[in-house]
């Protein structure tokens, strides 16, 4: 059902090949895996999108990262860009906190809590407390710097295998439905 909808919404390979803006990039953006909906390409697009969704920055940076990775790995480009939207203003804080915790685990840090903000932060004289704020960011930065790529890789692997498995289960279900229909239509031999 989702596949039929996506096939209707996404452009065809001929439309992409004849597009004057895409033609400027030569054959790099015309590879069939970038636009076709099949199991490996879509699963790869989901994995790339999950990985690129944790690139620090706003959505255009993540879209660009997802698109460049999709072209380099030859996986579904629209899916990879679309999946990067999982990191949004509502989910980014829990994701970064989880990445921070993974980074602490990777560093074998005994302190399992997020470093507390200095007590002098009242918001009125922020410039006078800038060195303390910088030290706080550095103390959070090392575990976060290690945890973000680790979390992105874990999410990408899980996304790839779950999408691949779901696609296979969907195909098996469709086979069973068609087999039942054929069995109902077949005349019974007496």
Image (cartoon, grey):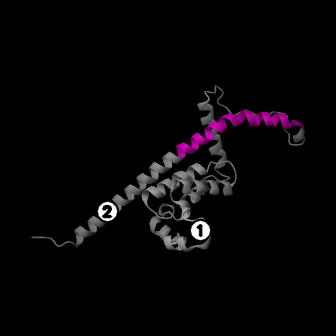
Q: Is residue 139 above or below residue 58?
A: above
Identity of the residue furthest to the top in this view: 110
- Residue 175 circle label: 2
| Residue ID at (85%, 38%) | 130
- Residue 84 position in % (x across, y down): 60, 55
- Magenta-colored segment: predominant secondary structure: helix
Q: Nearer the viewer, residue 24 or 46?
A: 24
Q: Is residue 136 above or below residue 8?
A: above
Q: Is residue 168 left or right of residue 59?
A: left
Which badge, 1 or 2, comes first in the chain's sequence? 1
For disc 1, the neighbor class at 10 Å (few under 14, some 14 to 19, many from 20) is some
| Residue ID at (74%, 35%) | 138
- Residue 34 position in % (x across, y down): 51, 61
Specify start and end residues of the magenta stretch as a single range.
Answer: 128-155
Residue 62, picture quadrant: bottom right
Which image quarter is the C terminus in?
A: bottom left
- Residue 22 circle label: 1
Which image quarter is the N terminus in?
A: bottom left
Q: Could you say whether the residue bearing mark 1 is in a helix, strand or loop?
A: helix
């Amino acid at each position: 059902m989702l596949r039929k909808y996506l096939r209707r919404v996404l452009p065809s390979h001929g439309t992409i090949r004849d597009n004057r803006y895409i033609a400027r990039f030569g054959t790099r953006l015309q590879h069939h895996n970038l636009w076709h909906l099949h199991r490996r390409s879509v699963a790869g697009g989901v994995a790339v999108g999950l990985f690129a969704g944790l690139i620090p920055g706003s959505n255009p940076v993540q879209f660009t990262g997802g698109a460049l990775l999709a072209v380099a790995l030859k996986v579904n480009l629209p899916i990879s860009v679309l999946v990067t939207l999982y990191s949004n203003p509502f989910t980014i804080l829990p994701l970064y906190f989880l990445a921070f915790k993974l980074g602490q685990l990777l560093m074998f840090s005994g302190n399992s809590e997020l470093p507390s903000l200095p007590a002098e932060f009242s918001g009125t004289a922020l410039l006078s407390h800038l060195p303390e704020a910088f030290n706080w960011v550095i103390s959070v930065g090392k575990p976060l710097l290690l945890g973000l790529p680790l979390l992105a890789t874990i999410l990408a692997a899980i996304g790839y295998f779950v999408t691949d498995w779901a696609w296979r289960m969907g195909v098996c279900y469709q086979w069973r439905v068609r087999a039942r229909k054929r069995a109902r239509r077949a005349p019974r031999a007496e």
